[in-house]
Image: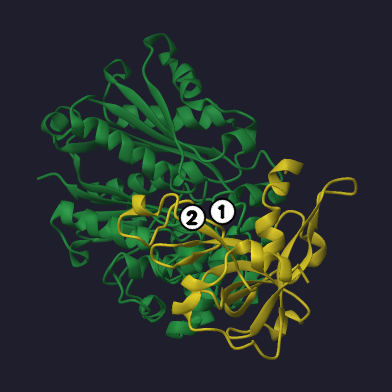
Chain colours: A yellow, B green
């Protein structure tokens, strides 16, 4: 993968920058330019604002990968999960800091900033989110109040990647 | 809209065809279909060619004119169109050819599907397979195509109680049918214990839950139903052919255990054909992974949602069951040359309806259905074929 191709996604992959539709309040990750939820899609054009996910969520489904994706050869066996974030969107990512046999649906996790893979000995190193288990997830406002949540910039500053 | 018939079919053997090139297999399947249709190539109006990844696999794009050229049609200057939809490329090419004839713009078209997967090492082949998923938001994070289907499987097991053994029944039946199909990649039978003991790929899926990387090509000739009997004694009518798309990534599905693209394409196809799932006598479905077969059976309306596993294990989809499914051996045993798969499904259904399937023949097969899926379900194509009365 070219350097630019990975680099341009760093705000999303490093800081969980998604988007929120100001018409219906739905949160998306990765960010979208058009809201798939609004009945009249055109209404949402220009009304999608940046929204940073907290990184907290629960394992919705998982698999233990033995036949790896390119660049993950040294990590097998590794866990890939669908993580349902507290803000709503489901993300695909590895679950780390546990043995594969400990993975289960419902496991509480939090996003953590890690090395994803390297492109050979002299190539680019890709970083991004993985998920690690946590004992407790902090109390959150009910989902309906997300429409009032502050946009990316403010939250981005006080939530640097772990 | 004019009625369309399948006039001829052809396919190569599927498997590791190391002695044969992409263009050779493409032409073999196409010529077989033309001969079967008793149609002169001079009558052809267009070629639609399904192929997923020739650029990554054999460093060759622009393959429709390549096949036309080596089929001896270069100087006839026919329009050649390559069609791509991941693993559903062949079925989508069929859909394009069907639309061309149905619209009245073209009378006779050849629809081909071809893929040469064994000119690259297995590891590369697996990476290219995963290119049908969302590269930026799934594959980059360590997910492969089988891993994504495993996420669907794990959730299906959680929500509906589907068991590992129920999944394992799918490849056992596929190999039993492959053993009766001379064109199949795998002609060996396997046991339930072998499936369960095989090495894991992405748990709960093991080696035998996943279809192989195969070479192969398939082709059909389509024409107007009203003149079909000039060319064949057993024309097969295209009663419906419908395409539907869904979100690219599994993570964005409304319910990850449901292939909405299949649900919608099937609903549209049954509406178009004025038929219901119970009217289908034989079906070819997407068993690239054992779980994909079970969710497909549910989402096509052949099983209630969540009942695919128990229904399959009870033999409802066996050769002597209520609805025989994948009598070709499916993607698992007949093989999985991406672009050729959807066309080969049509070939199998046509031969079943004509009563030409020998040991694999389903009794009283008058109407068949083919369902092909791209990636994890971002594209589905559902086709219903009937004996022409």
Screen quadrant of the C terminus of chain A? bottom right
2 and 1 marks in contact (CB < 8 Å): yes
Residue at image coords 55%, 62%:
A29
Q: Residues within 10 Å of mark 2 (few under 14, many from 20)?
A: many
**Left or right relative to B170: residue B190:** right
Q: How many labels does the image show?
A: 2
Nearest to the observer: residue B275 or residue B235: B275
Picture coordinates of residue B235, whole percent (x, y): 19, 39
Picture coordinates of residue B344, whole percent (x, y): 40, 45
Picture coordinates of residue A66, whole percent (x, y): 71, 67
Pointer 1 chain: B
Give residue B248's mark: 2
Q: In which quarter of the image is residue B233?
A: top left
Pointer 2 chain: B
Residue bearing mark 1: B134
Q: In this view, does B350 lie above or below B187?
A: above
Q: In this view, does B31 lie above or below B339?
A: above
Picture coordinates of residue A119, whole percent (x, y): 81, 49
Question: Tag 2, which secondary structure?
Answer: loop
Q: How crowded is mark 1: few (under 14 residues within 10 Å), some or many (20 or more)?
A: many
Q: In which quarter of the image is residue B218?
A: top left
Screen quadrant of the N terminus of chain A? top right
**Left or right relative to A23: residue A53:** right
Share a chain, discs 2 and 1?
yes
Q: In this view, does A34 lie above or below A160?
A: above
Give residue B72's mark: none
Residue at image coords 59%, 49%:
B131
Nearest to the observer: residue B19 or residue B379: B379
Mark pair 2, 1: CA separation? 6 Å
Q: Is residue B343 visible?
A: no
Residue at image coords 90%, 49%:
A121
Residue at image coords 33%, 52%:
B358
């Amino acid at each position: 993968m070219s350097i630019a191709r990975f680099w341009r996604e760093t705000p999303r992959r490093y800081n969980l920058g998604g988007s929120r539709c100001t018409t219906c309040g739905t949160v998306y990750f990765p960010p979208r330019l058009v809201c798939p939820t609004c009945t009249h899609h055109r209404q949402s054009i220009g009304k999608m604002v940046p929204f940073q996910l907290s990184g907290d969520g629960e394992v919705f489904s998982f698999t233990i990968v033995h036949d790896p994706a390119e660049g993950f050869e040294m990590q097998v066996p590794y866990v890939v999960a669908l993580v349902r974030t507290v803000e709503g969107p489901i993300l695909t990512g590895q679950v780390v800091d546990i043995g594969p046999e400990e993975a289960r649906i419902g496991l509480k996790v939090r996003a953590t900033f890690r090395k994803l893979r390297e492109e050979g000995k002299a190539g680019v190193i890709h970083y991004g989110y993985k998920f690690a288990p946590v004992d407790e997830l902090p109390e959150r406002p009910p989902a309906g109040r997300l429409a009032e949540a502050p946009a990316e910039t403010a939250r981005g500053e006080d939530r640097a990647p772990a | 809209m004019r009625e369309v018939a399948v006039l001829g079919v052809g396919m190569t053997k599927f498997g590791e065809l190391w002695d044969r090139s992409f263009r050779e297999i493409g032409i073999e399947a196409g010529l077989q279909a033309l001969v079967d249709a008793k149609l002169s190539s001079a009558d052809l109006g267009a070629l639609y060619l399904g192929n997923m990844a020739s650029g990554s696999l054999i460093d060759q794009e622009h393959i429709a004119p390549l096949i036309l050229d080596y089929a001896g049609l270069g100087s006839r200057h026919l329009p050649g169109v390559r069609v791509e939809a991941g693993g559903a490329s062949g079925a989508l090419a069929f859909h394009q050819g069907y639309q061309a004839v149905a619209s009245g713009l073209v009378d006779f078209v050849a629809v081909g599907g071809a893929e040469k997967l064994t000119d690259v090492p297995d590891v590369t082949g697996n990476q290219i397979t995963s290119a049908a998923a969302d590269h930026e938001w799934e594959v980059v994070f360590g997910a492969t195509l089988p891993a994504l289907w495993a996420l669907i499987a794990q959730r299906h097991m959680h929500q509906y109680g589907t068991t590992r053994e129920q999944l394992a029944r799918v490849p056992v039946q596929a190999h039993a049918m492959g053993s009766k199909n001379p064109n199949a990649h795998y002609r060996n039978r396997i046991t339930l214990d072998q499936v369960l003991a095989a090495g894991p790929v992405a748990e709960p899926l093991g080696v035998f839950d996943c279809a192989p990387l195969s070479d192969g090509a398939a082709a059909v000739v389509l024409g107007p139903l009203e003149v079909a009997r000039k060319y064949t004694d057993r024309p097969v009518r295209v009663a419906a052919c419908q395409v539907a798309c869904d979100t690219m990534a599994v993570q964005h599905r409304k319910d990850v255990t449901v292939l909405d693209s299949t649900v919608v394409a099937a609903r549209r196809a049954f509406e178009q054909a004025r038929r219901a799932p119970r009217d289908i006598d034989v079906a070819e479905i997407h068993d690239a992974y054992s779980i994909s077969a079970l969710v497909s059976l549910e989402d096509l309306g052949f099983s209630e949602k969540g009942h695919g596993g128990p229904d399959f294990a009870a033999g409802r989809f066996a050769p002597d069951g209520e609805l025989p499914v994948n009598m070709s051996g499916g993607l698992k045993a007949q093989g999985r040359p991406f672009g050729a798969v959807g066309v080969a499904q049509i070939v199998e259904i046509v031969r079943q309806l004509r009563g030409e399937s020998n040991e694999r023949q389903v009794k009283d097969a008058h109407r068949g259905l083919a369902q092909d899926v791209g990636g994890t379900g971002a594209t589905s194509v559902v086709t219903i074929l009937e004996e022409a009365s």
